Image (cartoon, rainbow, N blue to C red):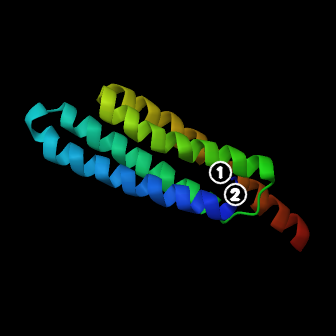
C-alpha cells in the first residue's frame, strides 16, 4: 500500500480532487464575499501539499517514511470530503496542517540528501 507508485496515484487523485474543490469554490463562492478567498486559498494549499506528496514519492525513502507520506496524502483526500461537508474553516485548518507536515518532510529529506552529497564529494 505504501509503495512509491501507490503514493503517486493517490497524489494525482488528491490533486484532481483539490482542483475540483477549487472549481466548486469559484462557482459557488462568489456570493459569499471575502470568505470566497479563504476557500480558494485552502484549495491551493491542499493542491500544493498533494504536489509535494507526489514529488516525495520519487525520493528514495524507507518504508516508514513512505507510510508517513501516504497517510498525509490520504488525509488530503479525506480533507476534500470534510471541506465539502463542513465548510471553509475546517478546510483551511486542514490545508495548513497537511501542507506544513509534508513540506517539513520534504525539507528534511532535501537537507539530508544535500548534506550526504557534500560529505561524499569531500
Going by the image, does 27 lie left or right of 39? left
The residue under the point 21% across, 31% down is: 35
Pointers 1 and 2 in contact (C-beta within 8 Å): yes
Classify residue 82 by image quadrant: top left
Q: Quadrant of the C terminus?
A: bottom right
The 10 Å Cα crowd at callout 1, few under 14, some 14 to 19, many 20 or more, is: few
Relative vertical location of residue 56 with respect to residue 81 in this rendering, above or below: below
Q: Which residue is mark 1?
A: 107
Q: How many circles with numbers are drawn on the protein? A: 2
The residue under the point 38% across, 37% down is: 81
- The residues tagged by marks 1 and 2 sit, at their Cα atoms, a distance apart of 5 Å
Kindly state the secondary structure of the residue where label 1 is placed: helix
Relative vertical location of residue 20 with respect to residue 60 in this rendering, above or below: above
Going by the image, does 49 lie left or right of 22? right
Q: Residue furthest bottom?
A: 121
Q: Residue furthest front?
A: 1
Which x, y percent locates residue 103? 58, 47
Which x, y percent locates residue 114? 76, 62
Q: Which residue is mark 2?
A: 110
What label sits on residue 5 in the rendered view?
none
Along the line of sight, which residue is nearer the eye, 1 or 42?
1
The residue under the point 90% across, 69% down is: 120
Which x, y percent locates residue 100? 55, 40
Kindly state the secondary structure of the residue where label 2 is placed: helix
The residue under the point 47% across, 44% down is: 77
Amino acid at each position: 500500500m505504501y509503495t512509491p507508485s501507490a503514493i503517486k496515484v493517490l497524489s494525482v487523485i488528491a490533486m484532481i480532487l483539490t482542483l475540483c474543490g477549487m472549481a466548486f469554490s469559484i462557482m459557488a463562492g462568489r456570493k459569499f464575499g471575502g470568505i470566497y478567498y479563504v476557500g480558494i486559498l485552502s484549495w491551493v494549499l491542499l493542491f500544493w501539499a498533494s504536489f509535494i506528496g507526489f514529488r516525495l514519492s520519487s525520493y528514495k525513502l524507507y518504508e516508514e517514511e513512505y507510510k508517513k507520506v501516504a497517510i498525509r496524502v490520504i488525509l488530503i483526500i479525506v480533507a476534500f470530503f470534510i471541506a465539502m461537508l463542513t465548510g471553509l474553516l475546517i478546510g483551511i485548518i486542514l490545508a495548513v496542517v497537511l501542507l506544513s507536515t509534508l513540506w517539513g518532510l520534504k525539507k528534511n529529506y532535501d537537507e539530508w540528501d544535500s548534506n550526504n552529497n557534500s560529505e561524499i564529494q569531500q
